[in-house]
Amino acid sequence: MVPIYARIRKRARQIVSRFPSPVFYNDFCREIESSRHYFDTDPVITRLKSYVARHIEDDFGHGIQHSIKVALDAGTLMIIEGCLEGYSDDFTRRRVCIVQCAGLLHDIKRKHKNHATQGAVFAGKILKDYQFTPDEVNNICNAIHNHEAFKSNVAINTPEGELVSDCLYDADKFRWGPDNFTDTVWDMVLFYNPPLSTFLNRYPKGMESLAKIKNTFRTNTGKKYGPQFIDIGLAIGNELFDVIKTEFAHLL
């Protein structure tokens, strides 16, 4: 990383460290632990995680660590929402596997144009080698197709399939909170390496895009807890913007 961006990233992470963790992670400790347990012990997830780690392009802010975080939070949301829907334990566990697979694969084509559409098609090919039913594969592919904000979505004909899609979307948008300023932005900067003046000029537009996410969450849990992720991200981003304009002004 260019030294100036390494210094700014360090300041960003210092700012993030002063903010509290989103309440979601305090209120759902048990569900988070269950999602992690499923993720670590399910042989399907283990196999797919290994595949994704070998094939995902990991230098664009949406690599394997991002995919794992999304998969874990999507699994947590599935457990919470599945309980509200009255899912049995066995059915919930299967749906967690499905949504975690979607989480692992959702950015497998991140550097490509129309990456959600291309990722969905690619996932469908990969999953032919896994023990999923055609409906389960469709659930995963549709969720991947629908995970971008402000894009047209494919219609999903079952509530179970729609829930997979909604859990993936919300878990992915949770990353627009503090994670955006600890890792994602800097991985993208490392890839593009823009002049600092260009980065700063584009910064307000990026913050506007972040703010627009606040009202797009889809699950009941996401609608309740997701906006706080965005509010924290906005507060961090605004503070960092002021820091860049003052502490690094001599480099502009």
Image (cartoon, rainbow, N blue to C red):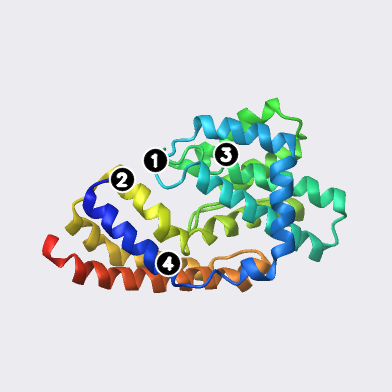
Q: Residue at x 69, y 58 (%)?
A: 32
Give the residue type that dot 3 points to: Ala
In x, y percent, where is residue 98? 71, 44
Q: Secondary structure at mark 2?
A: helix
Alpha-carbon neighbours of circle 2 within 10 Å: few (<14), some, or many (≥20)? some
Give the residue type that dot 2 points to: Leu
Give the residue type that dot 1 points to: Asp
Name the residue tied to disc 2: 190
Q: Nearer the N terminus, badge 2 or badge 1?
A: 1
One can see residue 154 in this view: no
User: Which of the two discs, 2 and 4, sits closer to the camera?
Assistant: 4
Name the residue tied to disc 1: 59
Q: Is residue 134 above or below residue 87?
A: above
In x, y percent, where is residue 74? 64, 54
- Front-most of 236 and 117? 236
Q: Secondary structure at mark 1?
A: loop
User: Which of the two discs, 4 and 1, sits closer to the camera?
Assistant: 4
Q: Nearer the N terminus, badge 2 or badge 4?
A: 4
Q: Nearer the N terminus, badge 3 or badge 2?
A: 3
Alpha-carbon neighbours of circle 4 within 10 Å: few (<14), some, or many (≥20)? many
